[in-house]
Image (cartoon, helix red, strand yellow):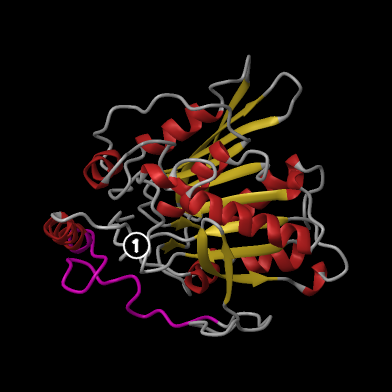
Amino acid sequence: MFPFHAGAPRRANDDARLSAANDLVRRTLSQHGLMPGGDAASPMANWTMPQMPSFGTAPGATAPGMNQFTCDAGSRDYLLHVPESAKDGATGLVVMLHGCTQNAADFAAGTGMNAHADRGGFIVLYPQQSRGDNAQSCWNWFSRGDQLRGRGEPAIIAAMTQKIAADYGITADRTFVAGLSAGAAMAVILGQTYGDVFAAVGAHSGLPYSAARDVPTAFAAMNGQAAEPAAPGPMPPTIVFHGGSDSTVAPINGTRIAAHAINHAAQTIEADTNGTTNGRDWTLRTSRGNDGRALLEHWEIAGLGHAWSGGQPGGSYTDAKGPDASAEMVHFFFDLAGKAPK
């Protein structure tokens, strides 16, 4: 998750500042082995474009199946997976936001979410960040202009989601958003600013709302060195995954997302569970309201780095060990909706 923003209008001295920020990003990428020349092999080195379903290609699209959405706040490309099982009525809509240096197809491959959609009959929407708006394809979670309702990327993604939901007759109580890293931070922003659009949030290796206001504070937040942000307003029910060995986004950020998710609950009933999946030890804390409704699942995975737990090798930033984050998010989302997919 490397927050280099390249799409904002420039002032007279911005070129030098952006150049310095770019140098910082490149050094950090190399430190974590995320670009050629780093200490570790790039996770994109052996990646190839996965086979994606074809639902028509928009003019000028950059990949098969790619479409474009435009609204007053701006435009973004997206991929849409509509399984055969959803043709006669989808059970819901899950919006998936990729991390930095990823794209929609890569994220679909790594999370394996389409396979869950095929079984559960729900649609998956993959918005894709533009390199013109961020040089590392990060969602701009650290920019104040992209943290508010009615502006920037939250407005674009929310409007895109509402359009797809309306097209397929999906109600807001069956519409969910999840993401990895920068995508998780943006998912949290969407939960905070568009709780009327998204019924629940999934945050994997992400950061809490308003954790940063610019590039320097973004890196401080990622390193766990920033002051805890003020508790935001009420959040939709939230499921959090974070690796205990994540050296890119410090695990304290997952803890803060979890705390914010239940901050406005009058009282919660909590339970802790420990287990092991494929050699990864994990702890799960669940929080429910007095009515028994789930408010939070917080998964902490020992030994997991900055990668999607239980992910598929076809995508970047995945770790096959540990519980399947995609499966657990799907169950969390649709249990809230009153109908768990198959």
Is residue 195 placed above or below 4 in the rendered structure?
above
Which residue is depicted at the point 33% across and 61% down? 7
Is residue 161 placed above or below 80 in the rendered structure?
above
Magenta: main secondary structure equals loop
Mark 1 neighbour class, 10 Å CA radius: few under 14, some 14 to 19, many 20 or more: many
Specify the farthest residue to the front. Answer: 12
Specify the farthest residue to the top. Answer: 266
Residue range (magenta): 29-50
Viewer-closest of 204 and 165 = 165
Residue 257, position as x, y percentages in the image = 46, 34
Is residue 55 placed above or below 337 in the rendered structure?
below
Residue 59 figure quarter: bottom right
**How many numbered tags mark residues here?**
1
Residue 312, position as x, y percentages in the image = 51, 68
Residue 101 figure quarter: bottom left
Q: Is residue 324 visible?
A: no
Which residue is depicted at the point 77% across and 64% down? 167
As for residue 309 lying within the magenta part, the answer is no
As for residue 39 lying within the magenta part, the answer is yes
Q: Is residue 272 left or right of residue 141?
A: right
Which residue is depicted at the point 68% across and 46% down? 333
The residue tagged 1 is: 134
Residue 256, position as x, y percentages in the image = 42, 31
Q: Is residue 71 left or right of residue 136?
A: right
| Image quarter of the N terminus | bottom left
Q: Secondary structure at mark 1?
A: loop
| Image quarter of the C terminus | bottom right
